[in-house]
Amino acid sequence: MTGSEPPEGMQELYPFLYSRESEIETVLGEVSRSTEEKAEEIVRLRREVAERSGFLLAECAEAMAKRFAMGGRLFTFGNGASSTDAEEIAAAFSNPSRGRSLPALCLTTDVALLTALSDDVSFEVVFARQLAALGGTGDIAFGLSTSGESVNVIRAVEEAARRGMLTIALAGDQGGKLAELASLDYLFVIPSASVHRVQEAQTTVYHVLWDLTQHALGNSV
């Protein structure tokens, strides 16, 4: 291989980097078209969720506000990229750039506890066991799953319901097994099979919930 040749497999991964000048216009056109399609899809999804779940979002925020007003706490959880969303939700409520700080904790941040429960018991209970130890009547459980099939999220929702907590979840596609839970108070489903589009729309949903909760508590944001 000469110094001018791309590493093996690199050209297939990033064809636009090695395109001949005559191909650049075509490649850029494809990238532009793909970007526009994705942007249009996420706008459509957000509009669809707003139209279908607008009243439910307001009702959920009112229920959250009532719990917070009585001293309730918010517990968030999810796997993979959803765990970072869970962290963002907890941070938005507990340390907002404006509005009132509200007690919130993400259950994915304690690595020692997560690995201990996974190793000693089962990964399926990493969130449920934390809620059993920390949660109680008046608190809020908020789970995220792009597929709606995450067993540890489902187990956590079930445990939260047994403890009298308000239960909220976000899911994608058709809602998966989360949609079958009678113990779930509020479920917001993003009707897309694309994980990326689901997570983008879920971000909007939980920020809207934060905003509406602040308003329900009488805070101007």
Image (cartoon, helix red, strand yellow):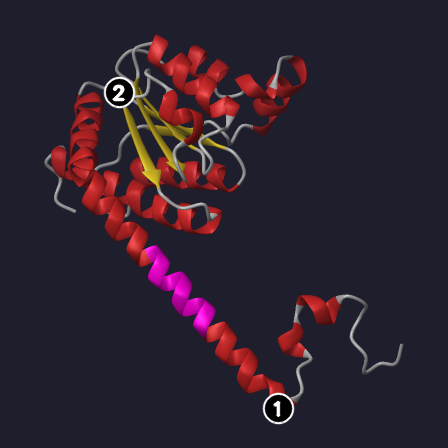
Which residue is farthest left?
Answer: 218
- Quarter of the figure with residue 212: top left
Instruction: Report the residue at 24% width, 38% height from top.
Output: 209
In percent of width and height, residue 79 lies at 52, 34
In percent of width and height, residue 196 lies at 46, 50
Q: Which residue is mark 2?
A: 72
Q: Earlier in the sequence, mark 2 or mark 1?
A: 1
Instruction: Report the residue at 32% width, 21% height from top.
Output: 184
- Side (left or right) of 42 relative to 126: left
Instruction: Report the residue at 13% width, 34% height from top.
Output: 216
- Pick the residue in front: 159 or 54: 54
- Quarter of the figure with residue 189: top left
> Dot 1: within a 10 Å radius of its alpha carbon, few (fewer than 14), some, or many (20 or more) residues?
few
- The secondary structure type at the circle numbered 2 is loop
- Quarter of the figure with residue 211: top left
In percent of width and height, residue 147 lies at 47, 36
Can residue 131 be seen from the camera position used here?
yes
Q: Amino acid at mark 1?
A: Ser
Q: Amino acid at mark 2?
A: Gly
- Side (left or right) of 63 relative to 201: left
In percent of width and height, residue 128 lies at 47, 16
> Dot 2: within a 10 Å radius of its alpha carbon, few (fewer than 14), some, or many (20 or more) residues?
many
Q: Considering only vertical position in the picture, is 159 above or below 193?
A: above
Read off the magenta span.
33-42
Which residue is farthest right?
Answer: 1
- The secondary structure type at the circle numbered 1 is helix
Secondary structure mostly taken by the magenta-highlighted segment of the chain: helix
Which residue is farthest bottom?
Answer: 22
Q: Is residue 105 magenta?
A: no
Instruction: Report the residue at 26% width, 20% height from top.
Output: 72
Q: Which residue is mark 1?
A: 22
